[in-house]
Amino acid sequence: MRLLTNSFARQVSVKTFRATYTPVGRNAISVVAGRKSYATVANAPLAEKLKVNGDRLWNDLHYTAHWSAPSPGGLTRLCATDYDKQARDWFRDQVLALGADYKVNATGTQFALIKGEDMSIPPIAMGSHLDSVATGGKFDGPLGVIGGLEVLRSMKEQGIKTRAPLVLINWTNEEGARFFPLLGSSIVYAGQSTVKAAHASLSNDHSGITMGSELARIGYVGDGPNTFEEFPISAHFEIHCEQASDLEKAGKPVGWVEGWQGMTWYSMEFKGEDGHANTYPMAKRKDALLGAAKVITELEKVAFENKGDSTVTNILSGPWGACNIQSNTKLSFCLMNKDGVAQEAMGQAIEKRVKDIAALHGLELEMKRDIHLLPGDFWPEAIDCVKRACGDKGIGSRTGTGHDSTMTTTLVPTAMVFVRAKDGLSHTAKEWSDKDDCTEGALALGKSVLNFDELMRTKAATV
Amino acid sequence: MRLLTNSFARQVSVKTFRATYTPVGRNAISVVAGRKSYATVANAPLAEKLKVNGDRLWNDLHYTAHWSAPSPGGLTRLCATDYDKQARDWFRDQVLALGADYKVNATGTQFALIKGEDMSIPPIAMGSHLDSVATGGKFDGPLGVIGGLEVLRSMKEQGIKTRAPLVLINWTNEEGARFFPLLGSSIVYAGQSTVKAAHASLSNDHSGITMGSELARIGYVGDGPNTFEEFPISAHFEIHCEQASDLEKAGKPVGWVEGWQGMTWYSMEFKGEDGHANTYPMAKRKDALLGAAKVITELEKVAFENKGDSTVTNILSGPWGACNIQSNTKLSFCLMNKDGVAQEAMGQAIEKRVKDIAALHGLELEMKRDIHLLPGDFWPEAIDCVKRACGDKGIGSRTGTGHDSTMTTTLVPTAMVFVRAKDGLSHTAKEWSDKDDCTEGALALGKSVLNFDELMRTKAATV
């Protein structure tokens, strides 16, 4: 592995960066009217020049998908598995071939820094993740990273140089599929968790394996920057398959993502009493699984009552065997809502019902709200860069889930490019975006970056 | 390991046995009035002489319980684990010290044959199991085996010789806790399954481990008799903790078990569709876990509607992680009823509701009724032997679950001795029977065997 010397250390400190960069309209972030005030103007001159190679992008998307546990048509590349190592090694080789300054940080995230005209400016980032869920498709994650790689390759070939440096990031464990919690590395970067906590993230298979030990096993605990403080960026852009049907319905290949719906994750555990499955009368039991089943059915009602969605994503129940009342049951679930008030109401409703069910069945309850994210908007100036990049090929859209961009947006101007997805399917082998749409997505990503670079240049000139 | 020569081969063939033994009233087995016609008479003369050593029994029950995974106050000795091997080795050493002819069969069941006056008669069996459920107590299983051992030891010390030989049996995997199905060896003995099927029984932890491979690992695949055809017995008696509260309410230490309630076991699987936990709308989903939760809540209703009980004993759901709709969920459950008509009604009701839930959520369904046991009665003459043995210290009772005796009763006169249990608790570390009650149980077991031996002698004399 080739590590270029010290280029990461040459970045300006975050303090300097914050002093020099004035975000536009960050305070107005949740006000839709505020966003409207950013007039759509033409793309930056360099953005108008950019082309991308759709064949190369498409080939790499499918080629890299062979680093996967068996999953016909899909992708099963859980974080820090051998398959993940293979995809990471490939990424390293590709960015080194581009002449990037390459680093891996302590949570396994890979950074590929490309020089800009002015190395005193924090780089503009493109990022997503190469690891996947257990039943993943080929697009959720890889399209963002390989799309960013295609932008870098095309810029190099076409001699397009940015004023700010660029950085392509392969974030670790965005999904939380193998290790909980999700956004496993970008949450550390955003200062909302620590390397220590990320390393201690437990495997969802209850084997006791941690993300830290598995990253070490595949050789991906590096000395690169872990936090925004250590390695600030100017902005973050990400392509992602839409995971919904708005673009498909509108007949548009791409979209600018204006914000996200509210999402809350809970984990809970019922403790009841052991007993004989055949002989102990139901009226006397403390059956943890029966209680959990009632929570699951209540979660369906709470979602419908509040015009939201809910999903139980994990259940573990014991003891073992064919002859015991279940005395211990654990659940993980999430609540989604586009409306913040309804999102809060869903949480309050299910918390009350879980407590009522515990009381009815005499169960001990432990319940924890692991993540609580109210609906919010990305940064207006970043959205505007993507909107101009999409032009009339796109529409405005919103994401229903969390991404690494959900973390970077707490720090710097961030927005996303959506690519049309078939039937809104995601996290399944059936996940699909057409080649032309992926090409449009990568092009919009590159143009967004160039638009933001131009925006920073203009602002610097007017200061 | 000392294997006495050929004594097992010297048993009469089952054909000869069946020709010589005329069961009393087997045809009237489900008719309560039929049982009443057996007048209670005095115990056999040898039964009146028998004493047992309650201290020795109590000490061995607690001593052997240390071969267990950590389980404060209880017993976790799953079938074919290292703990199980230790308890089996101890059993072997005890019966060899008594001069028993000792054999292990292909499914790991241990036989200890004690000579009788007439070795042409099939032995009278005492049997139960030393292996336990995951959250077991010290009594369910071990009391039956160690109680039988105490009877053999006391008879030897007191010079009590039976006409028929006796055999003490440690049956393998009665519970089905580690490997499904339950009654794992006695079901083969009764000709309702095969050694091959028993060896293929899969671990309930979904590791793919089988009972056959684990028995081989601990050195308990032997060449002893596997079936009643190979090694017939004349009768089977078993002590067991009551697992209910009838004796406790009646203030009696022991009971004669007249029969069992109906029990049906099902396994089922819902297959739905993969999808993103946050973004895919609930209305379009095929959520296997949501369907399974509704089955669990319906099982509660079906039990109440039919004055029975139901228990879900296992749930396994996937895929893995915090970000996926559950597309595959497996359940195991059982239905219990004292009334055969109501038992059938419960099965029909839940089968219909499971199908309705599958249709509502668009789920593929696989469902199998693994075991279906209608309520039934043990053999009147065997019950009568136990009833006389209990005398005024006992009452009639019924068991709510399956035992190895449930298999032997399909072949030969079988009955059980119940021992008073605290609060009806079983399959929990809180399972408890007092020392004096265990002693009464072992005494009743020994007397029952001697009563049956006398009954066979009388019948042989009158033929």
Image (tube, coloured by chain):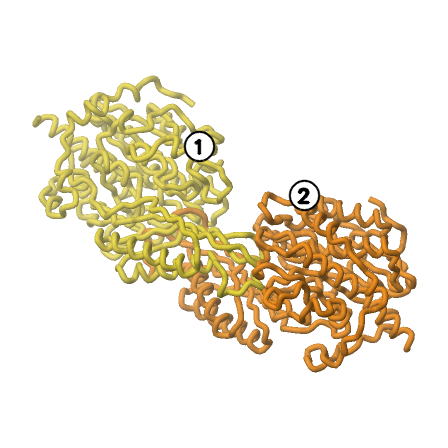
Chain colours: A orange, B yellow
A71 on left or right of B435 = right
Which sits in the foreground, B9 or B368?
B368
Query: Are dots 2 and 1 on a single chain?
Result: no
Most foreground residue, A396 or A380: A396
Which residue shows up at 81% across the image and 50% down it?
A95
Q: Between tags 2 and 1, which lies in front? A: 2
Instruction: Please name the amino acid that badge 2 sits on.
Output: Asp
- Write down the residue under mark 1: B212
Q: Secondary structure at mark 2?
A: helix
Q: Which residue is mark 2?
A: A82
The reply to whether residue B296 is visible in this rendering is no
Q: CA distance from mark 2 to mark 1?
A: 32 Å
- Splitting the image into 4 quarters, where does residue A10 fall? bottom right
Image-based side of B404 in relation to B292, left or right = left
In front: A55, or A270? Answer: A55
Q: Is residue A376 left or right of residue B246?
A: right
Rendered view: B15 above or below A438: above
- Residue B436: x %, y % from top left: 30, 46
